[in-house]
């Protein structure tokens, strides 16, 4: 695949165009993004979009932590809480799912 012209922060940073597109497809399907050491070694991050009255993504909310606390088995559970927080803020801004 074709690499984008971006900087790889770690060996896990997604820089191949096909990998980036596939990751965006997964994000859309599950409703949250998951950074598995793509920016910082030993760190994971889960994020969800905050939408405005018109459904536009205007911000995001995330939680980050070391792999020792954000173990792979808990990612979906943590993501559920992050998405709930994003939904709550979005609703307060007038977004109707």
Image (spheres, rainbow, N blue to C red):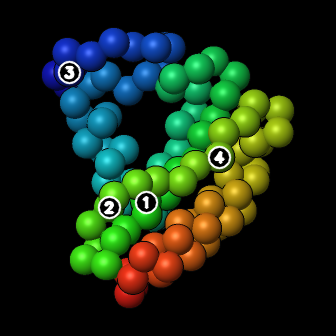
Task: Tell me the SS state at disc 2.
Answer: strand
Residue holding disc 1:
49
Query: Which percent across, then down, holds residue 82?
Result: 62, 61
Query: Which percent across, then down, holds residue 58?
Result: 34, 58
Callout 2: 10 Å neighbours few (<14), some, many (20+)?
few
Task: Tell me the SS state at disc 1.
Answer: strand
Comparing 90 with 78, the one in front is: 90
Residue holding disc 4:
63
Callout 3: 10 Å neighbours few (<14), some, many (20+)?
few
Q: Tell us which disc is closer to us: 4 or 3.
A: 4
Taking the image as shown, residue 93 lies to the left or right of residue 78, namely left
Whether label 4 touches label 3, CB < 8 Å: no
Callout 4: 10 Å neighbours few (<14), some, many (20+)?
some
Residue holding disc 2:
57
Task: Tell me the SS state at disc 3.
Answer: loop
Q: Tell us which disc is closer to us: 2 or 3.
A: 2
| Quarter occupied by the C terminus | bottom left
Determine the image quadrant of residue 3.
Answer: top left
Report if residue 7 is visible in the image.
yes
The disc, 2 or 4, on the residue closer to the chain's N-terminal end is 2
The disc, 3 or 1, on the residue closer to the chain's N-terminal end is 3
The disc, 4 or 3, on the residue closer to the chain's N-terminal end is 3
Q: Which mark is residue 4?
A: 3
The extreme bottom residue here reads 96
């Amino acid at each position: 695949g074709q690499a984008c012209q971006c900087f790889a922060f770690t060996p896990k940073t997604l820089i191949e165009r096909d990998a980036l597109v596939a990751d965006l497809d997964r994000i859309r399907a599950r409703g949250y993004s998951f950074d598995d050491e793509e920016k910082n070694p030993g760190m994971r991050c889960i994020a969800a979009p905050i939408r405005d009255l018109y459904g536009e993504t205007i911000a995001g909310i995330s939680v980050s932590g070391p792999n020792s606390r954000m173990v792979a088995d808990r990612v979906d559970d943590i993501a559920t809480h992050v998405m709930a927080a994003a939904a709550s803020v979005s609703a307060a801004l007038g977004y109707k799912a």
